[in-house]
Image (tube, coloured by chain):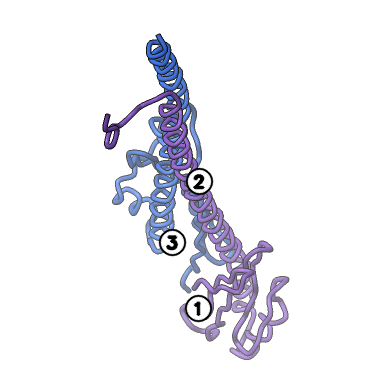
Amino acid sequence: MANNNRSNVLLVEILIAVLFFMLSATVLVRVFVAAREMTMKSEIATEALTEAQNVAETLYAAENEEAELERQGFLKSHGVWTKDCGEYSLYVSGTVVSMDAGEMWQGEVCAYYSQRSAGSGVEEICALKSTRYREVQR
Amino acid sequence: MNRKGRLSFGPGAASLILIVVILSMSVLGMLALMNGRSDARLSERSIDVVTAGYALNDEAQRALADLDGTAAKCAEAATSDDEYAEMVRGMLPAGMLMNGREISWEETDGLRTLECVVELLPWNGQQRFHWVIYRLTAITGEVWN
């Protein structure tokens, strides 16, 4: 009789333990998923920032900005140059403005998470100002 | 009769194991979350630093454009190199200093400073300026050339 009672208590305890484990596992899995998403997102942000810097520096050195963007695989649409890089997209807008004694390239290189990494909506990663003044040779 | 070596699984053992497992998993989860957060903070910080650097570059380029406009006007009016340099010295845009033929100014956002120095080239040359110093300095004293 005592042995039977002991087995029942053990069974109930194991059942409660399994239930509690399932509840905890649900919470813990969400924590792990959130941590992984954060890490992935920051990896994408770092990669996008490096790529945006590369584009901005290339534009700084370029004689013809539009030709350089085309060479790098950007596509022009409604005055904005875009490039899909998988997890993020790059957007470049800008124009050459005539100044008193020279001309200035005034642009902006922006990176956004693509839809599949951002979920819903558009989320900006960075926006770098790309400006270069060039003297007009006498 | 010999109970040695017999594994007994009585009431309480399951709870004990469960507590150990849940605690270990919670610690690992918290560590993973902290790691993720610090990664995110680090990338946000580097984005801020890089963005601020490019914003300062933008201001420096605009200042150079102002200076070049002034120099071009002076070059048209001057009749000699010395006169040209003196005219540029007299018409320098606000915030710029001229030492010899070097013109210096700083762009700052409070946390970092971009030190800019250009050299005024001879009056009858092809170009008016060339960069001598272009140095980004953080407030901590770090120098990012």
Q: SS at mark 1?
A: strand
First along the sequence among labels 1 and 2: 2
* Disc 3 to disc 2, C-alpha distance: 38 Å
Q: Position of residue A114 (x, y in %)?
A: 40, 35
The chain letter under disc 3 is A
In the rendered image, which quarter is residue B58 located in? Answer: bottom right
Quadrant location, the N terminus of chain A: top left
Say what amino acid the circle numbered 2 marks.
Met
Tag 3, which secondary structure?
helix
**Chain that bears disc 1:** B
Foreground disc of the pair 1, 2: 2
Residue at 66% in and 62% down: B109
Q: Which mark is residue A60?
A: 3
* Chain shown in purple: B
Q: Secondary structure at mark 2?
A: helix
Is residue B23 shown to the viewer in this render? yes
What is the distance, in whole Å, between disc 1 and disc 3 at their CAs?
15 Å
Residue ID for mark 1: B130
Which chain is assigned blue? A
Vertical position of residue A123 compared to residue B107: above or below: above
Q: Which residue is at a point 53% across and 86% down the rendered structure image?
A: B122
Question: What residue is at 61 percent from the left and 87 percent from the top?
Answer: B79
Q: Amino acid at mark 1?
A: His
